[in-house]
């Protein structure tokens, strides 16, 4: 069970006074042995109480929850393994693994435990691996970048594991009427076998991702005789594509958060499907905007056209605008930075609804690309850049001839083929929009309604001069 501590030693280690620790002992939040000493897991219990207090939950509230649900800390300690970990001082850890104190502290800060003054056996095992990597010749700065990528990526993964389980399992059980000890038992019955699957599954997805990344690295090796090394570490040729939904704020306001989340989920599927077909990679997603990178400019152009074609095939979907540029970028911590990346973002901002704009660098590298047409879109001045840039609109040679209409309220696009009701009156098309997104409606006309029955509206194909119509 690890080293036992006196109450004074526990106080010094956690920064909590002995009097406060005594009060938590009386509440049953921490436990001591018959000799009045505290086992190693008590340190983590104290930190959990401190964490809860920072979030506005007082010890008495924790005690009340434990009275109805059982020991609320026990499951956490079991899942994270804190129940049998022994602590080691930072100097001891650094000396054991062969790293200086400052580097160990820096790594712990990245991990999010910079305030801790001791490490456990897992910390030591990880630091030993990092020390070996440095000894093998990997620069410490490169290793720090890798640690940041690990932490950022896996924190998102861990949050998804915990949040999705909570919302889709624990909350579902609550809606079925379970509470207290029954709820805890039912939740554990699902979580315990599921937890055992996490790490093997994680290793599988890492292996698959490593295969894809290694293929891209192979290409760099195949052409390295043609590209002498440059003075900047990490600079590489790259095509960057930004894809974004138009009028998405309006759509969210009208249709509600749930409908908006459903649209983004579907949009994510489309973007990732197209990226996979053209050897692209989604670097980041911020809301409804995606940044993709490609080693070849023509793949960025073809992928953008494919994304728009797929979106147009949806029964109803928000409009898109996209922009791309080909140049070089610096690779840093799983991301790409540099003026050429910024230029791609500026090009995307120039694109109007339904437009896919690219720079001449993309067009020049994509000559001969089948089924894609480049049309001059004029010369533009980009914010933050000197000079002007020739832009081109990219379309498919086989763009569909069906006219897409725009809902004047939520700004969704659709074709008359997908309208549930339509007629022509006084030269204008009237139609009832299909409802494909489960949502409440929030609009300036009143409070959200439980079910959406959109009013009949007058819609022009160009989306110009549209106005609400009367009910049919």
Image: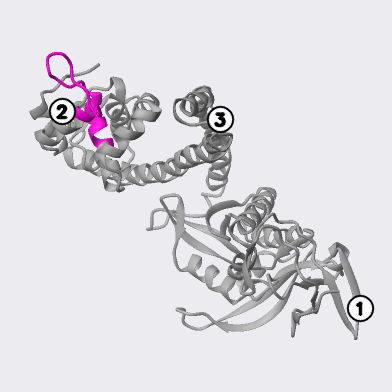
| Foreground: disc 1 or disc 2 | 1
Q: Give the range drawn in magenta.
A: 25-48
Q: Can residue 346 be seen in this view?
A: yes
Residue beneath label 1, please?
A: 424
Which residue sits at x=47%, y=60%? Answer: 329
Q: In which quarter of the image is residue 368?
A: bottom right
- What is the quadrant of the N terminus in the image? top left
Up/down of 56 relative to 366, above or below: above
Give the image location of residue 18, x and y in percent: 10, 33
Q: Is residue 76 visible?
A: no
Distance (Cα) linking label 3 and label 1: 56 Å
Q: What colouring method underlies this structural image?
A: one colour
Q: Which of 377 and 113 is in front in this view?
A: 113
Give the image location of residue 316, x and y in percent: 76, 62
Up/down of 144 relative to 182, above or below: below
Looking at the rendered structure, the secondary structure element under dot 3 is helix
Task: Point out which mark residue 92 bears.
Answer: 2
Q: In which quarter of the image is residue 406?
A: bottom right
Residue beneath label 3, please?
A: 204
Give the image location of residue 442, x and y in percent: 62, 66
Image-based side of 103 in relation to 349, left or right: left
Q: Which of 322 and 377 is in front in this view?
A: 322
Residue furthest to the left = 8
Q: Which of marks 3 and 1 is nearer the N terminus?
A: 3
Which residue sits at x=59%, y=55%? Answer: 294
Image-based side of 74 in relation to 113, left or right: right
């Amino acid at each position: 069970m690890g080293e036992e501590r006196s109450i004074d030693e526990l106080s010094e280690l956690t920064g909590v006074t002995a009097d406060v620790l005594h009060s938590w002992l009386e509440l049953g939040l921490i436990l001591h042995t018959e000799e009045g000493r505290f086992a190693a897991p008590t340190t983590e219990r104290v930190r959990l109480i401190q964490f809860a207090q920072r979030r506005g939950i007082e010890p008495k509230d924790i005690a009340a929850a434990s009275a109805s649900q059982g020991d609320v800390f026990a499951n956490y300690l079991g899942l994270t393994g804190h129940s049998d970990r022994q602590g080691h001082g930072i100097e001891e850890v650094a000396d054991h693994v062969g790293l200086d104190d400052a580097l160990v502290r820096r790594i712990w800060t990245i991990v999010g435990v910079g305030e801790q003054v001791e490490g456990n056996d897992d910390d030591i095992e990880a630091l030993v691996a990092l020390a070996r990597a440095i000894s093998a010749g990997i620069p410490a700065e490169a290793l720090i970048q890798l640690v940041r990528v690990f932490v950022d990526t896996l924190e998102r993964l861990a949050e998804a594991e915990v949040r999705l389980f909570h919302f889709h399992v624990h909350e579902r059980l609550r809606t079925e009427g379970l509470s207290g000890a029954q709820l805890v038992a039912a939740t554990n019955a699902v979580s315990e076998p599921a937890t055992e699957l996490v790490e093997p599954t994680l290793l599988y997805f890492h292996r698959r991702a490593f295969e894809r990344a290694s293929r891209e690295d192979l290409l760099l090796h195949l052409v390295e005789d043609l590209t002498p090394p440059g003075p900047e570490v990490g600079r590489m040729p790259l095509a960057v594509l930004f894809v974004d939904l138009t009028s998405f704020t309006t759509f969210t306001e009208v249709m509600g958060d749930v409908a908006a989340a459903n649209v983004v989920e579907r949009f994510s599927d489309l973007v990732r499907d197209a990226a996979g077909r053209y050897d692209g990679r989604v670097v980041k997603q911020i809301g409804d905007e995606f940044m993709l990178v490609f080693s070849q400019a023509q793949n960025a152009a073809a992928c953008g056209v494919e994304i728009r074609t797929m979106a147009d095939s949806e029964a109803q979907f928000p409009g898109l605008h996209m922009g791309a540029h080909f140049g070089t970028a610096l690779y840093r911590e799983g991301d790409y930075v540099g003026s050429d990346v910024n230029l791609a973002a500026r090009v995307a901002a120039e694109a109007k609804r339904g437009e896919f704009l690219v720079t001449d660098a993309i067009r020049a590298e994509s000559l001969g690309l089948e089924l894609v047409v480049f049309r001059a879109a004029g010369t533009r001045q980009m914010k933050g850049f000197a000079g002007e840039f020739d832009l081109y609109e990219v379309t498919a040679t086989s763009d569909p001839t069906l006219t897409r209409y725009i809902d004047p309220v939520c700004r969704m696009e659709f074709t008359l083929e997908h309208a549930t009701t339509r007629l022509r009156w006084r030269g204008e098309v009237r139609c009832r929009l299909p409802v494909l997104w489960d949502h409440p409606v929030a609009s300036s006309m009143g409070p959200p309604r439980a079910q959406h029955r959109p009013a009949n509206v007058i819609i022009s194909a160009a989306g110009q001069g549209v106005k609400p119509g009367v009910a049919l």
